[in-house]
Image: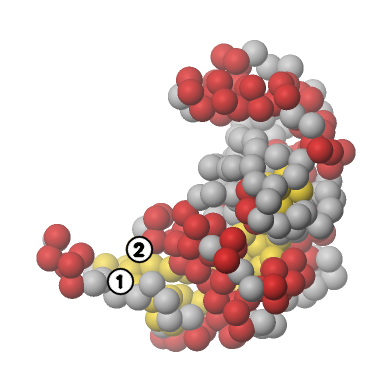
Amino acid sequence: MRIILSPAKQMREEGDTLAPAGLPQYLAEAGQLADYLRGLSLEELRALMGCNEKIAALNWARYQQMDLERASTPALLAYDGIQYQYMAPRVFEGAYYTYVQEHLRILSGLYGVLRPLDAVTPYRLEMGTRLKTPFCRDLYDFWGDKLARAALEGERVLLDLSSWEYGKGVVRHLPEGVRVVKCVFGERVGEKIVEKSVHVKMARGEMVRFLAERGAESPEEAKAFDRLSYHYSPQDSTENRLVFLREESGQEKKKK
């Protein structure tokens, strides 16, 4: 079984906690993208990323100084968004690192697909960015079927914990016969199941940790997930869609 997960916009450099195990598989492709972005002006980069001046200036400087081969932070520790905070890899036991290195693949607009212990440098490039260049129409075109091939590496079962923006770059290129199981983390609102972004990110990170603690080898083992007030809902699930419903705390109900 392989597990796919989205990256985070927030990143940090950290070289003391854990040494990287190697460089990303698609370093040459990442270099091609970085070279193109390095050639953009600050305003061009800001327009492309659709961000504020501060974020644009930070990432323009990053691309000007970027040396992909000298990166020193493992991807799992470099991403600092909500789902990675809830995964809490900095306090993993050794066996958990071994598990995620084998089973988890992190999707990336710049790097394509990352193993958790691949060395990365901070960057910003979302998969949905409308990056039209002389060599690609957008990032989905640029990466083609490489994301699916690198995510699977011969496996036939994929547990999808990624966002739609990232996951579709993998799923659309999967070979016939591969089982894809999507995890849905939601709340029942009337007759609908509604996913709330912050809670979903928290649950995805917590689910990775949950699977690592158990050394899970199949999606069915995810059904036991019972953290952050979620529980598996068999009546709302299918073979390829595992639905987890969140129960509101008493304090949250009072706020309403």
Q: Position of residue 113 (x, y in %)?
A: 74, 52
Secondary structure found at label 1? strand
Q: Is residue 223 above or below residue 92?
A: below
User: So how many labels did they put on this image?
Assistant: 2
- The residue type indicated by label 1 comes to Arg
Residue with the mark numbered 2: 194
- The residue type indicated by label 2 comes to Val
- Mark carried by residue 188: 1
- The residue located at (84%, 42%) in the rendering is 27
Q: Is residue 47 above or below residue 10?
A: above
Q: Position of residue 228 (x, y in %)?
A: 38, 72
Q: Is residue 170 above or below residue 3?
A: above
Q: Position of residue 223 (x, y in %)?
A: 51, 84
- The residue located at (61%, 35%) in the rendering is 124
Q: Position of residue 47 (x, y in %)?
A: 54, 21
Judge the density around disc 2: few (<14), some (14-19), many (≥20) Cα neighbours within 10 Å: some
